[in-house]
Image (cartoon, rainbow, N blue to C red):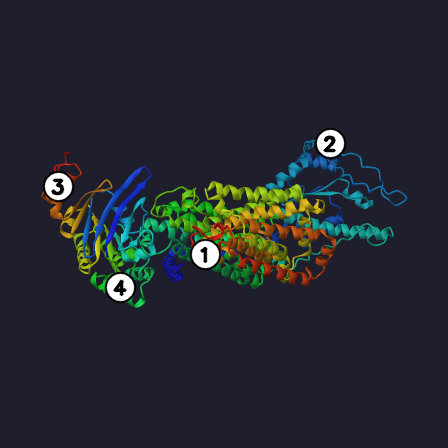
Amino acid sequence: MRFSLVWTIFRKEIAETLRDRRTLIMMIGLPVVLYPLVVLGGTGLAETQATQIEARVSTVAVWGALPPELAAALGAEAAKLKLVEWTGAPAELRSDLETGRIAAPPLPPRDPPAAVPPGGTPDPSPPAPAPAPTAPPAAPPDPLADAARAVVSSREVDAVLVTWSALGPDLAGDRLGRLAIYYDSVRPDSSQARGRLRAELDDFRTALVTRREQEHALPPGFARGLDVASTDVAPPQRKAGHVFGVGISFLLILMSLMGGFYPSIDFTAGEKERGTMQTLLCAPLSAAEIICGKFLAVWSICLITGLANVASLAATFSRIVPAGARDMLRLEPSAYAITFLLFLPVSFITSAAFLAVGAFAKDFKDGQNLVTPVYMLFALPIGLTMLPGMELTPATSFAPVLNLALLIKALLVGEARLETAFLTLVSSFAYGALAILAAAQVFAREQVLLGGRESLRTTLGLERRPGGRPGPTFAFVFFSVMLAGLFYGSLWAEGRGVLGALLLVQYGLILTPTLGAVLGFGFPFAETFALRRPPARGLAAAALIGVSAWAAASPLVRLLPPPESLVKAMEKSLALGGEAPLWVLWLVVGLTPGLCEEALFRGLLLSGFRRLGKWPAILVTAGCFAVYHTSVYRLLPTFVLGALLGWLVWRTGSLACSVLAHALNNALIATLVRWEPAAQAMGGSGGVPLSWSVAGLVGVIAGVWLLRETPGAEGRGGDADPQGGSGGPGRANAG
Amino acid sequence: MELRVEGLARRFDQVNAVAGIDLTVKGGEIVGLLGPNGAGKTTTLRMIAGILPPSAGRVFLGELDVWARPIEAKPRIGFLSGDTQLYQRLTPREVLFYFGRLYSMAEDRLTRRVALLIEQLEIGSFADRLCGALSSGQRQRTNIARAFLHEPDLLILDEPTSALDVVSGSFIVEAIRRERAAGRGILFSTHVMGEAEYLCDRICLLHEGRIVDAGRLEELLARSGCRNLTDAFLSRVGRSPGGTAS
């Protein structure tokens, strides 16, 4: 990859884009105008309406007789209520109310208090069985509600207050006085009238109860019984973060993605349509250089759009928002910074996806038709963040783009957790890299670039290649797809118990797809899986590394200690719930991952990455192995173990060595977790004792020394053939 | 540097667009690839230029296999076709600098070459106007400059004068002659027989993806017994000069 050429392509694309008015308007013009317009328009309109409703006096029809003191309270100037008698009441209804033919409906029955026997313990007898559910009876006709609905809907009045005929005598006789309010919740001024009535009636009731308590010489609060105060403890920042994280980040991401939408089509389909793609292909450039230059340009435009959106939003909220909404929308600058930073991976994925899909299109129109569904595919999951209860969990942390939108939300309300944030970023990087690889693969197919059509499988280089070897692209694509599948598959397998889930994941979700891929794509089985007789020294080195690597790597755990809950879950998993015999433990926790995971990582993946060269291949495979364990706390130790296992295979040319080391490593840890004295020694605050770590390090060094002395595949020129024709892990080894 | 094409073929689905072509172009020589529309000229030239992968056959530039080592081979090839377009929102000067950098030319050499080509091809009056505002003749002159910019050993010109007026076409003809004088090999495709007659040192007659005859103009005429290239071509593809099958 020649970065000077990538930079040249990038600069040209940016220069062309900045001369395109349409894109400039989408990038900067729209956000600069949109937010002030929406916020000013939206909040201003809402505020104006609220002010108008507040200023307006509510007209309330009173159907029935009001006792004088209540009429005085409701008719006070401060109440902003205009009482009109019998307005809108049909004559027959009025007569029925006045004569009492229509009376107050019976009060709903109150739940009796739980029976407490004299001894003070609840009645132990089982509760009566609940009656079988039946369909609710049809509501009887209610002429009063019908008449009130008609008069409120016609806007003749804002609400109807019904006083039953016995209200006056009931109040005078210290009994329960009853009224009813009829209003239309859809009409803001009707709801306002109801609110005002409730407020005045509450005040009247409080005064009435106080007077009754005094008249009957009862202590204050006798009738009220209980006072409950609720206080919202969420700080203003959290409330603002909630509003921002849920709603505004959705709008922000959508707007910013729109910035990359047109350039991605223009740089691919547009270039084909204008006839300039052929000229570009004449130049001495690799597909990767072309796609990187174009990708960086699309990504930058997306980011500039994102920045313009965030800046416009921040300016709008800090300067333009009306006073009433300011508290709700006040955010620290760090919140905007977080949003923009997380927009980096969001736009990374979407830019790559837009570009990959755009490259398939024949012309600009075709490009719009192809890229729009991708845009919708990203937009809809982001919209899901607005659903109540939608949060960043292990399950959602692997959902592309949705996970990042949820992470923004979680960070803004202060609920982000390191583990799910890690999973989100790792999976997002994998998805983004996949999309870029796909785009590069499309660009490498001149047939597609010159306007022809090929099958998706051919274009993405996934056609069957009997006798061929897996390459780095295949390895990466396979790992990324496996990772997502494994994650959701293991969530699904969780309900089958520790043993069942482990076997299902290892054999069903790791080994079977790995074998299927090698057979399905026609890769040479023995070479891909390095099925060679291992040298004796190699086996000895593997055994040494297998029993000591975990202890040697344990100080790395102290750099980022896992939470207690994770340690307990790990121990439970390693010990298979503590019930299985030891031999089952060794088979399931030791040998099974040794076989299945090694077939995937040191077999298919290392074979695929081999073209990158010895150490890049080993380290990239180790990186995949570390990421596969989906825990930020285990990242470093598993990376070190993965690198050692990779080197074992590279050096000896035999997968058997890494299977042995991996199986011993797992089996030993699982046994120690079961063995009480060892578990106690490791359970202290310091974790694995230092003496054990030193001993482990000595063991690893001895294994490495032994391996260096082993005349393996590498020693016979494995590195000499970077194409993988005869070297690397697939190399035969008779020694 | 000699171009050597061996058994070049390209199949699209069930159609053999090019069915095995062998040819050579030496330095300082103009070879014309003549044929009607659909004869396989563009496909052949794209394969030689390293743009379209062949189904079979090999292309050598000197000892360099174009398809095995494209990054090394492409700087030695200049490609121009009649339908090649320019970036609408860049100026001709910017286009030349852009491609010069893509060909990894040193900045001082690039600056000198751009200045020389702007002068030779009379681009100066519109060198700083956006390409989207240029006439087709001006665009094609810019394209010639772009193809000649990195001083390639081999020039591949696919119907470069199509859709151009006489004046614009003469710029191209002059430029081609100048490059031949500089010792560059030129592979030139056209369906205009007259153009080939006065410009080409050797001519390959292409029909349905195959070279049906090749040689100097006088050799082709002598073999066919015809008086002009059009008649010679028609006779080679089994049609009488009058338009009826022979």
Q: Chain of mark 4?
A: B
Quarter of the figure that contains the N terminus of chain B: bottom left
What mark, if any, has residue A719 been given in the picture? 1
Nearer to us in this view, A639 or A54: A639
- Earlier in the chain: of badge 3 and badge 4, it is 4
Mark 3 closeness class: few <14, some 14–19, many ≥20 residues within 10 Å: some
Q: Chain of mark 3?
A: B
Residue A454: image x %, image y %?
38, 42
| Residue where numbered disc 4 is placed | B114
Nearer to us in this view, A173 or A87: A173
| Residue where numbered disc 3 is placed | B231
A39 left or right of B172?
right
Q: Chain of mark 2?
A: A
* Element type where label 4 sits in the image: helix
Quarter of the figure that contains the C terminus of chain B: top left
| Residue where numbered disc 2 is placed | A132
Residue type, label 3:
Asp
* Element type where label 1 sits in the image: helix
* Element type where label 3 sits in the image: helix
Distance from the alpha carbon under mark 2 to that under mark 3: 100 Å
Distance from the alpha carbon under mark 3 to that under mark 4: 42 Å
